Structure formats: C-alpha cells, structure tokens
Image: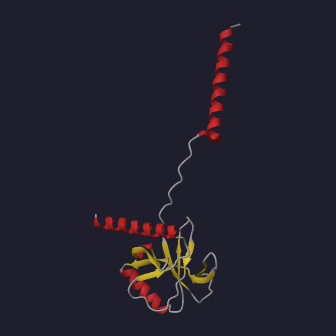
Amino acid sequence: MRVTRAWFNINILLAFALMMGLTTSAAEGDAPAKKPRKPKPVKAVRIYVETRHDIAERSLAATVGRSSPMSFQVEKLPILNEVHVEEAALLEESGTYQVQLKFNSLGTRVLEAYTAAAVGRHLVIMTDIDAEARWIAAPLVRRRIGDGVLRFVPDASREEMQRLVRGLNEAIAKKKKRWLN
C-alpha cells in the first residue's frame, strides 16, 4: 500500500473545500457594490386624440394622472409620434414647468388638421418613462394649432421630463446627422 496516493486525494479535497469557501463568501456580499445606473433618456412620445366613440376595435382606454386620475377613450392609433418632433424643450413658467414640442412640417400639418376637427376634445400624450407606457398629459384643444407647437403640463416629475426632452433632442440630432452623411 502506498501512502502517497492518500496524500494526493487529501490535497484535492482541501483545494476543493477552499474553492467552495471562496465562492460562497463572494456570493454573500464581499464583492464590491455596483454603481447605480444613470436612467436612460426617454425617446418615445405618442399623441392620441380623444374619441367620442366606444367602439372597442377603434379605441383605447387612457387614464391620465396619478393623484386625481381622469379617464378618456382615445383613437387606437396615435396621430403624432417622436418622428414628427423637430425640437423639444422644458419651459419654466411661474413656478411650474411645461413641455414644448415643436413639430416638423408634416407634424405641423397633421396637428393643425386634427386640432381643427377636435376642438373641445383632448389630445392625450403617452410616453415610456419607466420602461412602460404611461399617459402623462391630456391638454384640451381650445382652438386650431397652426404653428406646429404643442405645450402641455405633464403629470410627471421634472427629472422625468428632462430625460424625455434630452432623449428626444438626442434622437433628433442623430437623425439629422444621418441625413447629412
């Protein structure tokens, strides 16, 4: 009988036990903590028009507001989206803030046509702030908007709206750069 063989098996057993001890201590929290990720800019905005019809195939239910929610029935397809936005801005006005969307020529014509036909109804605005769709505003159409500029007070935090404005403007700049090259 050889003694060296038993010695070899004990070394493998000790090495395995040592490896298991290191992996469990690393899993328990000895690893350095990761930095919290900076939230991604929001790059999507959809504008729907309120409908007076309750046809399920043509409309969606929209609830705007978290503290005092308002419910609307909107057309299933948006009339405008981020492709039509030429510039986005966050405006400070009398202690509050508004989001201003300036649309390109096609978006201006669509906005003018729909607001002329939808006086007295709401434009309901949706975005994907928290990686899920959320209805953030429902401005009432009081008159035809012919200048292509839509302003609204959102039901969202200032930081969320800064992310939206920054994301839309970055997407616009990227699109313009692609067109120039």
Viewport quadrant of the N terminus: top right
Residue at 60% from the left image edge and 89% from the top image edge? 53
Q: Residue furthest top?
A: 1
Q: Residue furthest right?
A: 1
Q: Residue furthest front?
A: 95
Q: Is residue 2 left or right of residue 42?
A: right
The spot of residue 159 in percent (x, y) is 50, 67
Residue 43 appears in the rendering: no
Q: Going 54% across and 86% down the picture, which residue do you hit?
A: 122
Q: Position of residue 28 (x, y in %)?
A: 65, 40
Quadrant into which the C terminus falls:
bottom left
Image coords of residue 90 (percent x, y): 44, 74
Q: Residue at x 46, y 89 (%)?
A: 115
In the visual, does 92 lie left or right of 57?
A: left
In the image, taking residue 8 as reference, residue 169 lies left or right, namely left
The residue depicted at 43 percent of the width and 78 percent of the height is 100
Residue 27 image offset from top left, x and y in percent: 63, 40
Q: Is residue 8 above or below residue 87?
A: above
